[in-house]
Amino acid sequence: MKPTLRPMALALFAAALAVPALAQEGGGDKLATAQEKMGEMTDNQATVKQLSDKANRNGDDDLIVCVLKKENAIDALIGVSNIAMDDLKKALAAAQEARADHELRKILVASSRVSQFTTESYECFPDQEVASDENIVNAEDFVAEDETDDNGDGEGDVGWDPPSTTPFE
């Protein structure tokens, strides 16, 4: 190899070695996010397990079935997320960013669904208050009276059809 090409070859070789390292640095955020979401899902799983135990002590069959459906769905989502986490780690090690993004999206979607199922499991208990970190919002509280009645006749416009005019008439 000519002396002038040697520094260029060394620079290319060093750059080739640096690419997987850079991918892993960017992947560190993905891995941290995935681990955080996995922690949230296991916390929600434990919460629903407690609600399931409470339903079993209550003895109401409908209540038990309601909570058990949510618990089973959460268990399945966590199983899928564990597989996605392993695949995410493999993809980051192989510097496959697209695959790592795909696996992270699986975990994020599963986390969202687990949160939803956790909230729904609280709703299985009709006489229980909602957890302290959740709020109930009634949309009707935010609608002004004049927004519901556009023509001022005191009647809503629900069921009113506009005149039938089309470009073909």
Image (cartoon, rainbow, N blue to C red):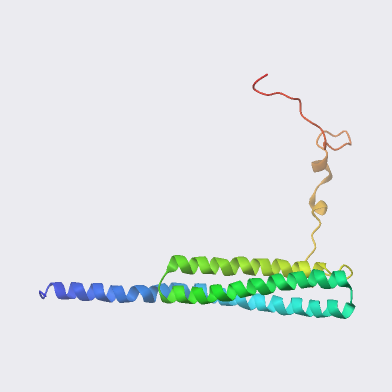
Q: Quadrant of residue 126?
A: bottom right
| Residue 11, picture quadrant | bottom left
Q: Residue at x 68, y 69 (%)?
A: 114
- Say whether residue 69 is left or right of residue 62: left
In which quadrant of the rendered image does the N terminus lie? Answer: bottom left
Whole-percent x, y for residue 165 in the image: 71, 23
Q: Position of residue 62 (x, y in %)?
A: 86, 69
Q: Nearer the viewer, residue 48 or 29?
A: 48
If the image is split into quadrants, where does the C terminus sit? Answer: top right
Image-quadrant location for residue 78: bottom right
Furthest residue in direction left, as rendered: 2
| Residue 14 appears in the picture as rendered | yes
> Residue at point 79% right, 31% down?
161
**Is 114 drawn above or below residue 50 in the view shown?**
above
Residue 27, given in percent of the width and then of the height, sits at 46, 73
Please say whether residue 33 is visible from this viewpoint: no
Looking at the image, which residue sits at the far top? 169
* 62 relative position to 103: left or right: right
In the foreground, 84 or 155: 84
Q: Residue at x 74, y 70 (%)?
A: 70
Q: How many marks overall?
A: 0
Q: Whole-percent x and y of residue 160?
A: 81, 32
